[in-house]
Amino acid sequence: MIENNPSNISSAFEMLLEEVEAEIDFVNGVGAKALEGRDYDRAKEALERSGVLTALRDKLAALRKDWEQLAAAAERDEDEETRAERRNLGKLRKGLRTPEAAYYKPILKDVDYDPLASGPDNPRWRNAGQWARNSMVNEGLLKRDSPRGIWEITDAGRQVLREQA
């Protein structure tokens, strides 16, 4: 099987896992507030939902691992011509697309502090930051295999910083 761009699927898994993690955090917060208010039925509901979400997160993590193994095997077996075709799929000529770096500075405007409709405890800037991180990983500026919550710059990222200084 030949995939279009395996790194897009890996990135989708990463974003999905981050969103599920955010939902777990939200539900845990609801449960904690319920306990503080001695609303034990609501706290129990939150605990059960958190358990279901945690199980889902674990399944997604296992699926991501399976995908990465499949993608690595496919990459090993590809010839150079197929690799070259994959790299050029859907790419625009340089300068046609607004550079992503142009979005970095305005990310923290007032509207970005508003909560997302999907999670009242999750501000818009956090979601935008996750997307920016994902793009920087895909561009090779940040390491893909950093521990959760840690963003490690790559040598290519350092080079970009030197060039922009």
Image: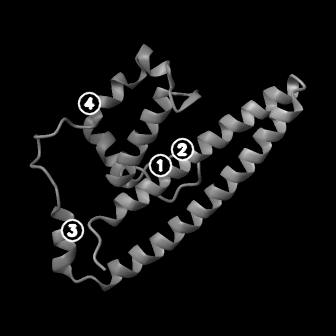
**Residue beneath label 4, please?**
102
| Residue 150 in view, yes or no | no
Mark 3 / mark 1, whichever is N-terminal:
1
For the residues labelled 1 and 2, the Cα–Cα distance comes to: 6 Å
* Crowd band around label 1 with a 10 angstrom C-alpha radius: few (<14), some (14–19), many (20+): some
* Crowd band around label 4 with a 10 angstrom C-alpha radius: few (<14), some (14–19), many (20+): few
Q: Name the spot of residue 44 as percent of width and height, x first.
A: 83, 40
Mark 3 vs 1: CB contact within 8 A:
no
Mark 3 / mark 2, whichever is N-terminal:
2
Q: Nearer the viewer, residue 135 or 63?
A: 63
Badge nearest the viewer, 4 or 1 = 1
Q: What residue lies at 39% left-to-right and 74% top-to-bottom?
A: 71
* Crowd band around label 3 with a 10 angstrom C-alpha radius: few (<14), some (14–19), many (20+): some
Q: Secondary structure at mark 1?
A: helix
The quarter of the picture where the N terminus appears is bottom left
**Residue beneath label 1, please?**
15
Q: What residue lies at 40% left-to-right and 81% top-to-bottom?
A: 73
Q: Secondary structure at mark 4?
A: helix
**Residue beneath label 2, please?**
19
For the residues labelled 4 and 2, the Cα–Cα distance comes to: 25 Å
Q: Name the spot of residue 22 as percent of width and height, x first.
A: 60, 40
Q: What residue lies at 76% left-to-right and 39% top-to-bottom?
A: 46
Left or right: 22 with respect to 77?
A: right
Q: Secondary structure at mark 2?
A: helix
Mark 3 vs 2: CB contact within 8 A:
no
Residue type indicated by callout 3: Arg
